Amino acid sequence: MTDLEAALRRAVRGEVGFDTTSRALTTMDASNYRRVPLGVVAPRDADDVAAVLEVCREREVPVVARGGGTSIAGQATGTGVVLDFTRHMNRLVALDPQARTAVVQPGLVLDRLQDAAAPHGLRFGPDPSTHGRCTLGGMIGNNSCGSHSVAWGTTADSVRELSVLTARGRRLRLGQEWAGAPEGLRDLVDGDLARLRTGFPDLPRRISGYALDALLPERGADVARSFCGSEGTLGVLTEAVVGLVESPRARALAVLGYADEAGAAEAAAGLLPLGPLTVEGMAVDLVPSTEGLPRGGAWLFVETGGDTEAEARARAEAVVRAADVVDALVVTDPGGQRALWRIREDASGTATRMPDGSEAWPGWEDCAVPPARLGGYLRDFRSLMSAHGLRGTPYGHFGDGCIHVRIDFDLLSDAGVARFRRFSEELADVVVAHGGSLSGEHGDGQARAELLPRMYGAETVALFERAKALWDPDDLLNPGMLVRPAPLDTNLRFAVLPREPVDVAFGYPSDGGDFSAAVRRCVGVAKCRTTSAPGAGVMCPSFRATGEEEHSTRGRARLLHEMLAGELVTDGWRSTEVRDALDLCLSCKGCRSDCPVGVDMATYKAEFLHHHYAGRRRPAAHYAMGWLPVWLRWAARVRAAPVVNALASVRPLTAVAKRLGGIAGQREVPRLAREPFSRWWRRRGGRPAAGGGPGGDLVVLWPDTFTEHLSPSVGRAAVRVLEAAGLRVALPPTLRGRAVVGDGTSRSALALLTARRGGRACCGLTYVSTGQLDRARAVMRRTLDLMAPVLETSAPVVVLEPSCAAALRTDLPELLHDDPRAARLAARVLTFAEALERHAPHWTPPAVNLPAVGQTHCHQHAVLGDAADRRLRASAGLTGELSGGCCGLAGNFGFEAGHYEVSAACAEDQLLPAVREAPDGAVVLADGFSCRTQLEQLAGVRGRHLAEVLAEGVAEGVE
């Protein structure tokens, strides 16, 4: 233990982390920069903060304050001690609705404040797109703004008083009329009044530099306001009093379509006299789908408010009339507005990829110019990018003249980094020429501080340095930011990554086969750290259960980045730190869809486990549950289900078996079906029941391991419904060789010629989820051999278990990227609802007419989509919305020893509350075997596959 670590452990009550994982998690924020800290401290209170500052001052160790770690200019990274306020100093201390103020700690997430203020008709005005994970301390440090700044200003406009600790331990209470000012600050201002009155651009989004002009006497000598945007370089915030604004009772959203972004930009300033709440702009390049948007190549999102919906709508329609648009849409439904705003908010992640999939990076993320000059600035900006051979798609706060953009800089080569510097210097001059600010929201950090002399001139920057010295004479707090900055092209986080592709098993088709590029996808926007209810979203269940960065998608990506870098994590694929971080990853695949940049941690986990255990003994659970298809087929072959079920009821035997198999002691072992699904199929002669007409489409029903051995009732129900819909049902071949699928009638499922024994088709899911990728590939190749006759037909493959369908859709072609048959089979895979919609479009399902509750399977949400299921449920009269999140069992995860508590916590997040609150008579839907098992074991509730619910209706209709 180092002297510094020992001293901190003696001095503070909060956690002190000098271990590899703690340090690796804080090497980066959401910027291009990386610094390796000495350690991390999570202070419990202001006394802890004071103790950290004293210990570090004695040893001349820098201190960096960190909130959600979503800063885009590098200011939340450092080489000394990082203060993590999110763990303990994250409370809403008080809320006064009459005074419209709140007292907050720096680690409080903005959404928590908004949730508390909402019942009083109030809200905090600024709302960055990262509102679900950014903290009030970080917002004050950066002077954050958000989409409503045209109405409610920046964070500085909402700050009333700040409690601050200086690096030398002074406790200050900052406010107006010089309240809390350090000694000498007033003299500094009085000695340079002319410069402070004339040397700062007059625009709504001037965030760059220190706000020394807030100290002018005519502006109330507001020390608290001048502290905003100082990026942790002047003092450490421990508490804040902030103002709240009245939230409109009703809102409307006018989405205005323009031919291009220049047209939208030039129109924005003209809408401001109408008093909108937002004037946000984005172009078509950032929108995965234009469905639901009005015609155009760019859009303005203009929100209006009112006391009633009619009043808000009338104001939105007035905006439409005043705007010269290609097309427009006005939405008053809150759900519809949320869906549209989600498109805009996700742009911060979507923008990290160009339309062709190539990478794009921040660095010039948020410059701002006077709104009336935005159109001209954008044209000059585009011209400069073109001159440098660069691409990027601007979007952002058009009403405030603030533009966000990610640019396809090459930050991996020396030549690319040199071009990054040249472009940055030239663009700074363009911004200044338009009367703008280098930063309009996210601060200067390392990305822009070096260029501040171009904006302010050398003498004003020297004034900034003098102000910094008054607050922090030892340069202890976040050195290298704002004044005396590090060069903008140093400390780049990509410099430490390997230049050659890493040898991996998966194909990573979206990343050119490069695992490093896949890991680079995580840019740190931290949507995975959102703790508010995600609605239909899934990501990230383990973070929501634990609250630990290590167990977020971003945290795991950071550890993988450091593993590839080899500086902190030095043992590569054998790293225990990475293994432990991935241990609580449920492989739910939620990040694949919910992460704005499509980080796929389930695949990265499987890849890591494959290498980590290569040539070594694996955990017992990998053999017990990874090889589950083998054990279940063996039990079925010898007809051992009754014996196995009987033994499973003997608790001492079960306890020993679970301990040997690495299974959580709290778990009940699921009972095996006495008759597997395929045996039932053979017993009925492979013949469809009455109703499957000879002219119906042939569909191949996939007998996944769970349906086959554990829930054959789901398979039987699916056959009944598919045949009632007029489809001919077949099962995959179990023999290899030349085969014909179906005989053209409804009487036979499969006719096989000149065939030899080949086993059963399997998606390989359990092997993939446990990282046994060599075995997974062998199983998948055998499956492709067996499915060869199916691929010679046009028959779809209907998969009832969502996790197996997802494995066939994604894992199969990505793991067997060298076998073209894998992509062909993946393209054939349909869910139960998709099969009915596409191949029996005229069939009407039975009228169930009941409320439905439950949870959309996480793999269905992430990979397959549930639009067809929603339409099928609606057609059957199943009303209500299914919850999001993950059930927490997630295949083998919830059964593994050591995972039970997290598994149960994930279920308690959304699924179990939804079931408890279900109306009488509601149908509990759960298409996944894991989801049904979790419901049964934790809530004593029987969940049913949609096929089972519809099959009951079909049977009643026949009777």
Image (cartoon, rainbow, N blue to C red):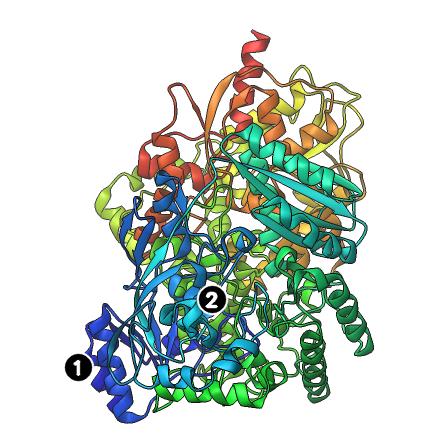
Residue 487 falls in image quadrant: bottom right
Q: Is residue 215 left or right of residue 898?
A: right
- Does 268 appear above or below 721? below
Three-letter code for the amino acid on which mark 2 is drawn: Asn
Quarter of the image for the C terminus: give it.
top right
Q: What's the residue at 47%, 26% (across, down)?
A: 852
Which mark is on residue 811?
none
Q: What's the residue at 36%, 45% (across, down)?
A: 117
Q: Which residue is mark 2?
A: 143
> Element at badge 2?
loop
Residue 424 percent coordinates (x, y): 67, 80
Quarter of the image for the N terminus: give it.
bottom left
Residue 400 percent coordinates (x, y): 61, 59
Q: Is residue 653 left or right of residue 499?
A: left
Which mark is on residue 10?
1
Three-letter code for the amino acid on which mark 1 is drawn: Arg
Q: Is residue 691 left or right of residue 924?
A: right
- Does 747 appear above or below 432? above
> Element at badge 1?
helix
- Does 332 appear above or below 257? above
Between 860 and 377, the one lying in front of the other is 377
Q: What's the residue at 30%, 84% (across, down)?
A: 183
Q: Is residue 564 left or right of residue 254?
A: left
Residue lying at the far left of the rendered structure: 10
